[in-house]
Amino acid sequence: MTGLSGAPVALITAAAHGIGAATARAFAEDGYRLVLADIDATGLDAAGAALPGQVATVLADATTETGSAAAVDAAIARYGRLDALVNVVGGSRPGRTVVDLELAEWDRWLALNLTSVFLMCRAALPHLVTTGGAVVNVSSGAGLRGMRANPAYCAAKAGVVGLTRALAIDHGPAGVRINCVAPGPVRTPLMQRNRSPAEIAQLGTIAVLGRIGEPGEIAAAIRWLASDAASYLTGQTIEVDGGPAPLV
């Protein structure tokens, strides 16, 4: 390490697109130095080039031990500190129930949505303890209320909520805050690949606000949770979903 001088440092996974890219912009606006991690080299370069300030990018797969370690190592090698970790990596492909789901596919979705959070936190926490930093994990409304024909995603995102609480209990005494956001439907590239325009419009009707969310709106919640404004908040999951539709 090169010491703890300079502006705070944030490491954001899945930073090439969607919520991750929007979160990177939000942290850049707050003066953070950034490390952006993703497996999409072209998207990662474009996202990094679009941001002001000091930005480093690292091609890393957060679902593997080597990839998660490489992402954290890149932050420490470049800046000498780590103040915030945002675990955005995730995804799904709805359409199969448990009966139809192969074990290999189940394992793949759990690795992407849950194991990645475990691995990134395991690699980052020793450095976050040094700075009294924060972690923000991204779960999903599907992890709280369920979703049709997407069992692995629902299970993994529910696991992120439980893991967040466990991490907060274990590492809060060392001064690290760990919280979670659970977005509702959000207009991300993943959403637009998985759903037709008509389906996306229909998803918007389930929210009290009558629309789906935008990546920047999720990023704003993440930004607040990582900031000193949320200094007495840990182990919590905040739903950012436009308000659940009433039953009647």
Image (tube, rainbow, N blue to C red):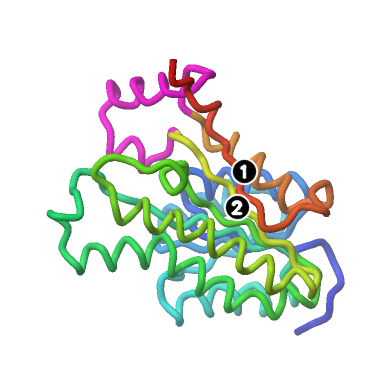
Q: Judge from the rendering whether residue 56 lies leftward or rightward of residue 114; answer left or right.
A: right
Kindly indicate whether the residue at mark 1 contacts the one at mark 2 (C-beta within 8 angstroms): yes
- The amino acid type, in three-letter code, at marker 2 is Cys
Quadrant position of the N terminus in the picture: bottom right
- Front residue of 34 and 154: 154
Which residue range is magenta in the image? 187-212
The residue lying toward the viewer, choosing from 86 and 205, is: 205
Label 1 is placed on what type of residue? Ile
Pick the residue in front: 69 or 106.
Answer: 106
Q: Earlier in the sequence, mark 2 or mark 1?
A: 2
Q: Say if 192 sits above or below 85 in the image.
A: above
The residue tagged 1 is 238
Provide residue 240's location: percent of width, then percent of height: 57, 36
Magenta stretch encompasses residue 200: yes
> Which quadrant of the structure image shows residue 203?
top left
Q: Is residue 92 above or below residue 3?
A: above
Q: Residues within 10 Å of mark 1 (few under 14, many from 20)?
A: some
Residue shown at the point (48%, 17%) measured from the top left: 210
For disc 2, the marked residue is 180
